[in-house]
Structure formats: C-alpha cells, structure tokens
C-alpha cells in the first residue's frame, strides 16, 4: 500500500522522485562522497526550480550517514531557503528536547524515509 510515488516522494516542497526509493534501498552507512558520486546528477524539483543533488550536498558538514532521512535532511539543508517550503527554521531550534522524536513527526509530513533493507 505504501509507495514512493506522488506525494510520498515529496518533502517540504521538494520532489525527490525515484531518488527517495534509491536512498531507502541504499546500503548504509554511506559517505557524502559516495552519495555525490552515485546520485549527484539527480535533479530535484523545488519551489525555486530544479536543483541537483550534488550542489545540495557539496557544502554538507556530515561525512557519513546511517539513515535515509539523514540524507534527506542534508539535502534539504543544502538547498536555498527559497527552494524549500517550511523546513528551514524547524530543525530543533524551537524544541531541542524533542529533536530525537523529529523523524517520527516528519514521517507523517514527508512520507516514510526509513530504510527498506538492512
């Protein structure tokens, strides 16, 4: 019943399309360099037009990711504020004590970003 098409592959105004499925099925942990090498050419539809995954991850401070939602968040962080709808400013600034529960609330807003295989 759950699929990665339509609204399920859209998060905060960014359409990930087939990249979402690829990230969920990818073997983790994964480095930023490996992500750029494999998925850097993917085009994301954003509120401000198309953006490449490579440009979103180039300035990423994280070097290794353990979960697909961490990659999603890094991509969203790397996009300009005008490209993302409702994401910037939410990343723990309001309620830092609830940051660990963030991925559960984001699943309801942005679809399931958990790993498909382990």
Image: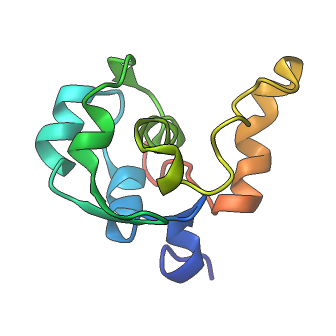
The quarter of the image holding the C terminus is: top left
When the figure is inspected, residue 45 is found, relative to residue 71, above or below; the finding is: below
Residue 6 left/right relative to 85: left
Measuring from the top left, give residue 30's x and y in whole percent.
30, 29
Q: Residue at x 57, y 72 (%)?
A: 8
Q: Quadrant of residue 59?
A: top left
User: From where the camera sits, is residue 27 visible?
Assistant: no
Q: Position of residue 100 (x, y in %)?
A: 76, 26
Nearer the observer, 35 or 89: 89
- Residue displayed at 64% across by 60% down: 110
Rendered view: 63 above or below 40: above
Q: Name the spot of residue 88 as percent of width and height, x first.
A: 63, 39
**Quarter holding residue 84:** bottom right
- Which residue does the image show at 73% across and 60% down from the upper left? 109
Residue 106, visible in the rendered structure: yes
| Left/right of residue 4 with respect to residue 49 in the rendered view | right
Check the picture and name the quadrant holding the N terminus.
Answer: bottom right
Question: Is residue 14 placed above or below 28 in the rendered structure?
Answer: below
Residue extending furthest toward the left: 37
Left or right: 112 as drawn, with respect to 51: right
**Residue 7 x, y percent position in the rendering:** 58, 77
Residue found 15% across the figure and 55% down from its top:
41
- In this picture, is 78 found above or below 64? below
């Amino acid at each position: 019943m759950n699929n990665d098409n339509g609204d399920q592959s859209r998060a905060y105004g960014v359409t990930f399309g087939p990249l979402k499925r690829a990230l969920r099925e990818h073997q983790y942990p994964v480095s930023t360099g490996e992500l750029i090498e494999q998925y850097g050419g993917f085009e994301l539809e954003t509120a401000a037009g198309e953006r490449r995954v490579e440009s979103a991850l180039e300035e990423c401070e994280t070097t290794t990711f353990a979960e697909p939602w961490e990659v999603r968040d890094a991509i969203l962080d790397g996009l300009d504020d005008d490209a993302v709808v409702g994401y910037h400013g939410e990343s723990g600034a309001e309620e830092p004590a609830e940051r660990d529960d963030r991925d559960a609330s984001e699943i309801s807003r942005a679809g399931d970003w958990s790993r498909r295989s382990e």
